[in-house]
Amino acid sequence: MSRSFRASLLASCLFALGATALPVQAAAPFAKTQAPGFYRMPLGDFEITALSDGTVKLPVLDLLKGDKARETDALRQNFQENPLETSVNGYLVNTGKQLVLIDTGAAGLFGPTLGNLLKNLRASGYRPEQVDQILITHMHPDHVGGLMAGARRAFPNATLHIDKHDTDYWLAKANLDAAPADAKGFFQGAMASVNPYVKAGKLKTFDGPTEILPGISAQPAYGHTPGHTVYTVESKGQRLVLWGDLMHVAAVQFTDPTVTIAFDTDTAQAEKAREQAYADAARDGNLVAGAHLAFPGIGHLRAIPNKGYAFIPVNYSGLK
């Protein structure tokens, strides 16, 4: 070993020892932000990107229509509390030929903690003008508000697809006029978000079961709203069913699917649609996604005899 090499090695060792003995630096400030809110996974020949619009605290014990003691206990057992920080999710499907967005988040219609879907769409590598088709599960503000960016259509090249039962209901001025004061905002938000697409000739309505494009179809799940719709995405035998607002509070409604919520237009119909969707998912083993399941909100459902269902989130994939 040469003298110069020994000297270099000794210097390196002394530097390393010195580095470990450096005093602790002043504490760094908390970042208080999350990573960009998108999650990507393959589905056959398609690619799914879950997009977070943010979270909002909901007073779920005031909204759910069930036994309050049982609901409180269910939240506690899941290490949750009221008000519940609730995810708002949208989903982008890349078919290889088209970009299809299912629900658009709230933009500014549901408070300051939401409205992040466009930002997260861009962070995921896409631009709003690239979106070809937009499928709306229903016309509540946290699903249609993101259609607009201020006074402009946020997705200038996209065609909008909504079940006719929902457009007939939410875009009718007579229904707005007849609505109680605390419900008028829902109608006004729907009109402000969807009517610019109507004016531009970019709205296509459908009625009941409909193939929107190859591999993506709509099925009615009425009750939460008059035209509430679930969308099935299927490629190479793999299937993802996008539930929209079939359920809101996982800790309560997976254990007891009969629990409804104040946002439902027809509670009995909404309960029936939820119970059918749960049974189908558990029987068929397909993936499901919920607009208000904890982000990214994708997973499987397993039936538990006499105890409802368990939701199993999708396993994380690095997509390598």
Image (tube, rainbow, N blue to C red):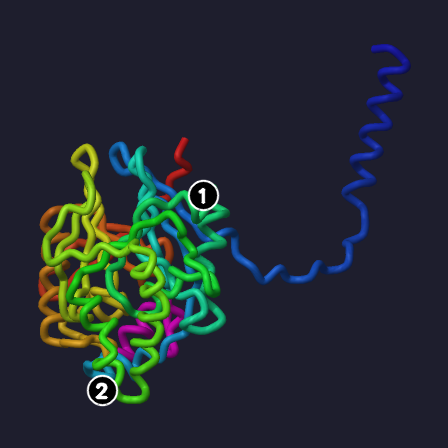
Helix, strand or loop at mark 1: loop
Give the residue pinned by disc 1. Answer: 126
- Residue plotted at (33% across, 74% down): 76
What is the span of residues highlighted in magenta in the rendered image?
Answer: 71-86
> Mark number for residue 178?
2
Asked if residue 125 is positioned above or below residue 289 in the image, the reply reads above
- Residue plotted at (36% across, 50% down): 50
Amino acid marked by disc 2:
Ala
Q: Is residue 315 visible?
A: no
Q: Nearer the viewer, residue 65 or 221?
A: 221
Picture coordinates of residue 41, whole percent (x, y) = 34, 41
Q: Earlier in the sequence, mark 2 or mark 1?
A: 1
- Badge 2 crowding class, 10 Å Cα cut-off, few under 14, some 14 to 19, many 20 or more, is few
* Left/right of residue 293 with respect to residue 308 in the rendered view: right
Helix, strand or loop at mark 2: helix
- Residue plotted at (29% across, 61% down): 198
Q: Is residue 124 visible?
A: yes
* Left/right of residue 236 with respect to residue 42 in the rendered view: left
Picture coordinates of residue 252, whole percent (x, y) = 24, 71
Magenta span contains residue 149:
no
Q: Nearer the viewer, residue 232 or 254?
A: 232
In which quadrant is the C terminus drawn? top left
- Image quarter for residue 57? bottom left
